[in-house]
Amino acid sequence: MKENWQQQLQSLLNCDLKTLYPLARSLNRKLEFYVGPTNSGKTYNAMQQLKEANSGLYLAPLRLLALEGYEDLKASNIQASLITGEEQMLHEDAAHVCSTIEMIDFDLDVDVAVIDEVQMLDDADRGWAWVNAIIGCPAKKIIMTGSVNALDAVKRIAAYLEEDLEIVKHQRKNELIVLPKWTSLDRLEDGTALIAFSRRDVLQLKQKLQKKYTVSVIYGNLSPEVRRDEAKRFREKKSQILIATDAIAMGLNLPIKTILFTTDTKFDGVSKRKITVNEITQIAGRAGRFGHFEAGYLGATRRDILEHVRVEFESPIKTIKPPFKVKINNNQLEALAAHIKTNSLTKVLKFFADNMYFSGPFIAANISSMLEAAAIVDTRFNLKLEDKYLLAQAPITTKSNIILQAYEAYIASVIKKKVCHYKPSITLPKKAITQRDLLLVEDEVKKISLYLWLSYKLPDLFPDHDKAYILRNSFNSFIEKSLKGNLIEEESPKKTFSKPFPRKENDSKEAVNSKKSYRPRRRKTI
């Protein structure tokens, strides 16, 4: 019996990824890689191929890009559907789908699929989604777009799949020039983008520069809708200067003439380090958008920063090396849990990462965000493993008490199979006075995104999709308005921001926690 158990376990722990996608294997697929730098027209050319196809799929790295792809197809009189983790706009007659890459349907075969920003397969948290899409996307022609650092990785995966690969090289359409001298903040030209690497630094620069310039800002904690609005202001020349994090490195086509780095260090989630050639190249490529400028310019706001940027920019791009990360799937989760006899999601995830073996250039990996969520759901002993796995994939951040309280309440609803209505954790003031006020509203928008995600996964338990969607629009409008005004860094202790929600007699403890007023506390913002 023991030998049989060991044999079954060894069978479970050996996986040939390509066999998990029989539909893709049946299509005799052709792979194409449109490779080149930013501003080389590779994504434009891929989308033209998609438009000419009878049926197609656009897989985007961001909800904002999926929406732009959807609108691009509609503008070309091509019926399309939009599918992201938070929204679905389905059209019965549509033969084209635009979706975030995690939402790919492996049972929907099409003529052409575009997998955008394929170098993201190296991302620590989301790279698995690109690996799965390349291997399993059911399309007769797969067009990948990305930078040259992904070329070797794409070749390795194509060789593993034994599928034909055509490489279509793209050159940048205009020159990108490194400025000879650093640039003072007092002498910024219109069309300049300043790069910082934290929300706090972006807002500090905004506070300083808006006395002299009109300013737009873009950073990761902003919702896609607000980022789009800020980008639109800059695009329409309603603002002279853009201040942004590396959130602009992907998916935003902006009329930037010059990119200036205000720092050469960033916190990468583990430590503070110098920015690399790959990061600089991806960001710098946004300068000098073709059709707007004859050339793009790259510089810095200090001499020492400019020197680091220059040296790195002139260095060779670092190639993405195997192995490529793979995430556990539902079948593997259930089978491993049954064999090691546990209901602990954390234990199964760690067992998977430590013991799973894949044919080809792949390695089992765990996603840090999923491990954090697993630690939370594993404290609930009456939660089924399949529900734990679903909830652990939800878009949460453990840095926000607003989101953590809501997450606990939503878990309680799943356990009790009790309908959970959306209720905000904060009450909007007339305007944001401090950066902390603004952060609370940004977190509330993320909480709405979590609810919307659950409303698609478990619509019977989370029925308030429309209400949450409308409220998100009002919160986003508040953020957009606040970003146009003054925000002080330190909040006034006399200012109260949110009010408590009254408790009803039938409220559960978890639901009450989600409704509590969140009074601001000082904390470091990243």
Image: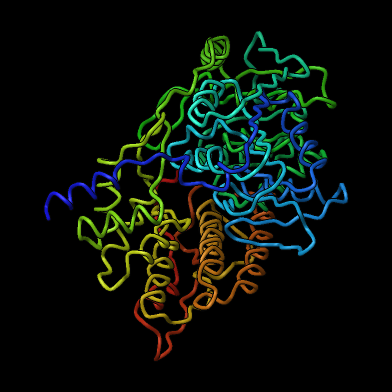
Residue 469: x %, y % from top left = 64, 67
Residue sticking out furthest to the right = 77
Residue 276: x %, y % from top left = 49, 21
Point 36% across, 36% down: residue:
358
Which of the 4 image quarters holds residue 314? top right
Point 48% across, 23% down: residue:
320
Q: Residue 264 vs residue 387: left or right?
A: right
- Image quadrant containing the C terminus: top left
Point 66% across, 60% down: residue:
478
Residue 399: x %, y % from top left = 40, 52
Against 74, is 463 above or below?
below
Residue sticking out furthest to the bottom = 505
Residue 10: x %, y % from top left = 24, 44
Against 147, is 124 above or below?
below
Residue situated in front as seen by the camera: 246 or 28: 28
Q: Residue 280 vs residue 34: left or right?
A: left
Residue situated in front as seen by the camera: 279 or 486: 279
Q: Residue 25 vs residue 243: left or right?
A: left
In the rendered picture of this protein, how many numbered marks are placed on residues? 0
Residue situated in front as seen by the camera: 304 or 167: 167
Against 296, is 234 above or below?
below
- Image quadrant containing the N terminus: bottom left
Which of the 4 image quarters holds residue 58? top right
Which of the 4 image quarters holds residue 346? bottom left
Residue situated in front as seen by the camera: 276 or 43: 43
The image's colouring method is: rainbow
Against 172, is 292 above or below?
below
